Image (tube, rainbow, N blue to C red):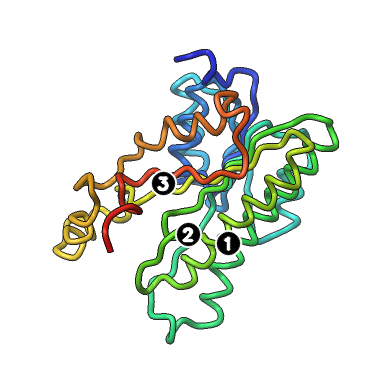
Amino acid sequence: MSDILNLAGKSALVTGASSGLGRHFAEVLARAGASVTLGARREALLEEAASGIRQAGGTVETARLDVTDTASIAETCGGHAFDIVINNAGVTHDGKAISTSAEDWTRVIDTNLTGVFRVAQATAARMVAEGRGGTIINIASILGLRVAGNVAAYATAKAGVVQLTRSLALEWARHKIRVNALCPGYIETDLNRDFFASPAGQALIARIPYRRLGRLGDLDGPLLLLASDASAFMTGTELVVDGGHLVSSL
């Protein structure tokens, strides 16, 4: 691995790290040498993820973290400053806007947008208090930059994450805190594999210029770029990883 992508000596927090993208991000950071704290609500899955990282030789801790609970965030983020923060925790809601309940709307916005702000604020406060910089990577989505049907709450939250990223980057640059957004396209996971094997899923894949879904490994390089000194002069940016989906014709 190039020295510029080496994270040895760095500490990282990954939210939503018990499964999916968050768990993968934690594994990538650990392989690059970072000491990683896995934060999520599902403690059994957290321990399973941590065990895998330890067996691979990584350094890892776990924290029961609920990004909708300020006390939970304070407990996890109130100690030493993290060098790298991956704001990944999120939920989805699939349904027509006209029938989306207030409860579903609030759940998505509170987790996917306000939760990102809460964690960014708490971790940045520690960075500032210790007089050190850091990098915060907010996991947005191409749905924060372009829209699809039946995901009004999710798309709105992710668009908010993009604008929040820019705002925090501007405000915190003086503290040497970089804030960037990683915007994945459609990435194949265990949760969506059956859908993408269906006719509707195959039709969606056909609209991606690369004619395939993203793989978890496709996010490794972009993640390490933003987490490492390789992006030392990057802040307030959106890094899109989508196989050309955003630039496909309407």
Q: Are marks 3 and 1 in contact (CB under 8 Å)?
A: no
Q: Earlier in the sequence, mark 2 or mark 1?
A: 2
- Residue indicated by mark 3: 20
Measuring 67% from the left and 55% from the top, which residue is drawn there? Answer: 117
> Residue 77 location, x and y as percent?
73, 43
Res 70 quadrant in image: bottom right
- Residue indicated by mark 1: 160
- Relative horizontal placement of residue 244, taking residue 135 as reference (left or right): left
Measured in 3D between alpha carbons, the distance from the residue under mark 3 to the one under mark 1, in whole angstroms, is: 22 Å
Q: Within 10 Å of the Cα at label 1, are there few (<14), some (14-19), or many (20+) other Cα atoms?
A: many
Measured in 3D between alpha carbons, the distance from the residue under mark 2 to the one under mark 3, in whole angstroms, is: 19 Å
Note whether residue 66 is visible.
no
- Residue indicated by mark 2: 144
Amino acid identity at mark 2: Gly
Q: Secondary structure at mark 2?
A: helix
Nearer to the camera, 147 or 68: 147
